[in-house]
Image: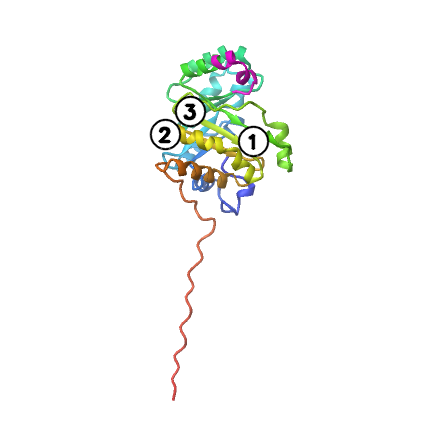
Amino acid sequence: MWTHRAWQGRLLPHPLPAHERLRQYAGWCDAVEGNTTFYATPTRETVTSWSRQTDPDFRFVLKLPKVVTHERRLVDADEPLRVYFDAIEPLGSRAHALWIQVPGSFAPADVPVLADFLRRLPTTHRYAVEVRHPAFFTDPRATRLLEGVLADASAEWVPFDTTAFFANPPTSDAEREAWTRKPRLPLRTAALTDRPIVRYLGRDAEPETVEGWQRWVEITAGWLREGRSPTMFVHTPDNADAPLLARRFHDEVRAQVPSLPPLPEPIPTTPPNPVLTPSPEPFRSHR
């Protein structure tokens, strides 16, 4: 997502034409989750616009369509995959990873299906898999099985860290809604590739969000020192301040790894105020 009602007029200008929204977001963050591609594959023209609005090093982590992952469960999906890959081609290297989120019912017994699916995907892209079945996190044999399949495909395992969110009961409407929808899974912090991807869900209260991500600051800094190139996505239930929080997380990591480049400066939401100079006193003659 790169537009959110709570950001309009505060973090992003409002109103804003559709072909300028991503450009404004890219002034705040240098990566984005492409969640809309889960619900419908965009047109090639739309994706071309995304490319024009972003720098070459901007990162898209784009979700595969649900018809592939949830409805056909990675089987007999050649045609929707063909349409998807053709649509995202204009992004080029901006397509940092293609995100395969499988349903919670996708169990260790289904891993051979995933292995076959990964083998048949184009090698021109990098892939990242998000699983939600508890056995992958609690059964060491299931963990090793999945890690082996992902390693064979040079694919990453995307953890969705909700531990800070579920540490305390909800206190807002957005938190109560998320409480019923978000997965409760054990924490996973291991990276399989040189491009780790982490999804983190905090709370609507900033102090709790910041406290909960401290482990990730240390882990991310360690990955950078190892020469990896991690991508971190910060969420809260209402996402009202998500870009601000993402920048704060980046700053905390950069304090430990000074070589990490700063994020871009956001484009102002309003033109700068003109500098007003006092009018000169009118000429007076005295006698």
The residue closer to the viewer here, 282 or 193, is 193
Q: Amino acid at mark 3?
A: Asp
The residue closer to the viewer here, 54 or 134, is 134
Mark 2 element type: helix
Residue linked to disc 2:
225
| Direction from residue 227 to residue 113 in the image, left or right | right
- Residue 103 position, x and y percent, is 56, 20
Q: Amino acid at mark 1?
A: Ala
Q: Is residue 13 visible?
A: yes
Q: Amino acid at mark 2?
A: Arg
| Mark 3 vs 1, N-terminal side | 3
Mark 1 element type: loop
Magenta residue check for 138: yes
Which residue lies at the image location 41% right of the left edge and 16% below the top edge? 151
Disc ID at residue 164: 1
Residue 153 occupies quadrant: top left
Find the magenta span and give its range. 131-144
Residue linked to disc 3:
86
Are the residues flagged by discs 2 and 1 in contact, CB closer than 8 Å? no
Which residue lies at the image location 38% right of the left edge and 19% below the top edge? 123
Q: Is residue 90 visible?
A: no
The C terminus sits in image quarter: bottom left
Mark 3 element type: helix
> Which circle, 2 or 3, is nearer the viewer?
2
Label 3, residues with CA under 10 Å away: few <14, some 14-19, many ≥20? few
Label 1, residues with CA under 10 Å away: few <14, some 14-19, many ≥20? some
